[in-house]
């Protein structure tokens, strides 16, 4: 399991280095199988503003840019990128800098003119769109914010962390989350654990009970099912801090609603799912065994033929999710979603583990 050092610090006042924490985790039975120092090699890459762009006199495909790099002054940068423009704030690798790959950047001459650094793409910073929107573009990363100039890009994008890969043994399912590991860290460091804030406000006019009917017809396979309705939402990109944490854990960002379900899973170990309420017939959720031959197309666009051993979540007419495995394409969160039903449930783990093996699947044509 991947565990970012920075995330653990939300719950424990850690007063030791990542290396020391690794030793302490091992002493209490948690083997750190690997450790990645994210952004370790990045150095002397700062924000700058392009104030002038001119055509290179000796090369048709090169542009000569004058940039304001804050405390580093005005610099001349020559680039072949076609997506830069005057006024853009971009990352620039200064003379003597190091990229995420470890490659060194030095000033040089391009077709007879000096270049005192290099503009950077997301790839050269070791990130993608899942970390910062625009990082996957074929070209230079353009910052969306009006950033201070000359500031370290490593600080701007928070590209400095240690990610532990911890082996969680089968007898410690309570540690299969950031909070679970943080609890162990608190114990081994003899520090208090700072619990997440679970408080929230409800609107009596938006009662889940009044608007959504939930019926459990398979209590032996689903001992508890909770639903919470959230209305008047806007589907949007998740904030940078949330996208960053998903990225460090190996997940890609989808949108704010889908991302928060993944975030809760990683943080406290509780799986969640989100349904678009307008796609649930009669605003109904029924937990039941599937009928033999019943079909569902899941979010990965695969069609499954189900049987009575499969537990499904249904609306008043059709399955909308394979319980504990994956949601249905027919109720996914979309750009026009405005009302969301969040699911949190306790399903029989044995049934879930065997479920896909008992269902046949074929790719959707």
Image (cartoon, rainbow, N blue to C red):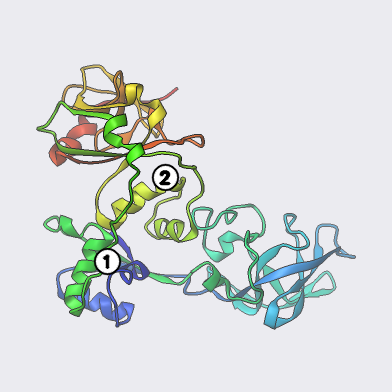
> Viewed as shown, does residue 334 lie left or right of 295?
right
Q: Residue furthest front?
A: 204
Place of residue 165 in the rendered image (x, y in percent of width and height, measured from the top left): 30, 64
Residue at 31% across / 67% down in the picture? 34
> Viewed as shown, does residue 151 lie left or right of 246?
right
* Figure quadrant of residue 162: bottom left
Quick one: quadrant of the N terminus?
bottom left
Instruction: Answer above or below: position of 45 versus 355.
Output: below
Place of residue 25 in the rendered image (x, y in percent of width and height, measured from the top left): 21, 73
Mark 2 lies on a secondary structure that is helix
The answer to whether residue 229 of the structure is visible from this angle is no
Q: Which residue is mark 1?
A: 33
Q: Nearer the viewer, mark 2 or mark 1?
A: 2
> Viewed as shown, does residue 322 lie left or right of 38?
left
Instruction: Answer above or below: position of 96 versus 137.
Output: below
Quick one: quadrant of the C terminus?
top left
Q: Nearer the viewer, residue 340 or 25?
A: 340
Q: Nearer the viewer, residue 203 or 74?
A: 203
- Which label number is shown at residue 257? 2
- Which label number is shown at residue 59? none
Mark 1 lies on a secondary structure that is strand
The answer for how far apart the CA atoms under marks 2 and 1 are is 32 Å
Instruction: Answer above or below: position of 18 versus 352.
Output: below
Instruction: Answer above or below: position of 105 versus 354.
Output: below
* Figure quadrant of residue 363: top left
Q: Residues within 10 Å of mark 1 (few under 14, many from 20)?
A: few
The answer to whether residue 218 of the structure is visible from this angle is yes
> Viewed as shown, does residue 118 lie left or right of 157?
right
């Amino acid at each position: 399991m991947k565990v970012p050092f920075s995330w653990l610090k939300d719950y424990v006042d850690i007063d030791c280095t990542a290396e020391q924490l690794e030793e302490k985790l091992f002493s209490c039975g948690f083997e750190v199988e690997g450790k990645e120092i994210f952004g370790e090699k990045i150095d002397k890459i700062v924000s700058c503003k392009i104030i002038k762009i001119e055509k290179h006199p000796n090369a048709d495909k090169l542009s000569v840019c004058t940039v304001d790099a804050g405390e580093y002054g005005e610099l001349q940068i020559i680039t072949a990128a076609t997506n830069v423009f005057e006024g853009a704030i971009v990352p620039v690798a200064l003379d003597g800098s190091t990229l995420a790959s470890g490659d060194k950047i030095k000033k040089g001459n391009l077709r007879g003119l000096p270049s005192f650094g290099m503009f950077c793409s997301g790839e050269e910073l070791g990130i993608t769109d899942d970390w910062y929107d625009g990082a996957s573009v074929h070209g230079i990363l353009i910052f969306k914010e009006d950033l201070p100039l000359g500031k370290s890009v490593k600080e701007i994008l928070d590209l400095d962390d240690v990610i532990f890969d911890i082996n969680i043994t089968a007898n410690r399912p309570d540690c299969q989350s950031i909070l679970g590991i943080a609890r162990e860290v608190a114990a081994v460091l003899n520090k208090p654990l700072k619990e997440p804030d679970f408080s929230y406000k409800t609107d009596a006019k938006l009662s889940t009970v009044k608007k959504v009917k939930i019926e459990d017809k398979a209590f032996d396979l689903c001992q508890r099912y909770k639903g919470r309705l959230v209305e008047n939402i806007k589907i949007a990109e998740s904030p940078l801090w949330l996208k960053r944490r998903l990225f460090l854990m190996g997940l890609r960002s989808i949108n704010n609603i889908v991302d928060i379900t993944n975030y809760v899973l990683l943080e406290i170990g509780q799986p969640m799912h989100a349904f678009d309420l307008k796609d649930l017939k009669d605003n109904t959720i029924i937990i039941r065994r599937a009928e033999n031959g019943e079909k569902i197309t899941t979010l990965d666009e695969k069609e499954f033929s189900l049987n009575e051993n499969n537990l499904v979540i249904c609306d008043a007419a059709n399955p909308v999710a394979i319980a504990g495995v994956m949601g249905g394409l027919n109720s996914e969160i979309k750009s026009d979603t405005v009302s969301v039903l969040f699911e949190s449930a306790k399903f029989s783990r044995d049934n879930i583990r065997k479920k896909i093996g008992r269902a046949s699947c074929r790719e959707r044509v």
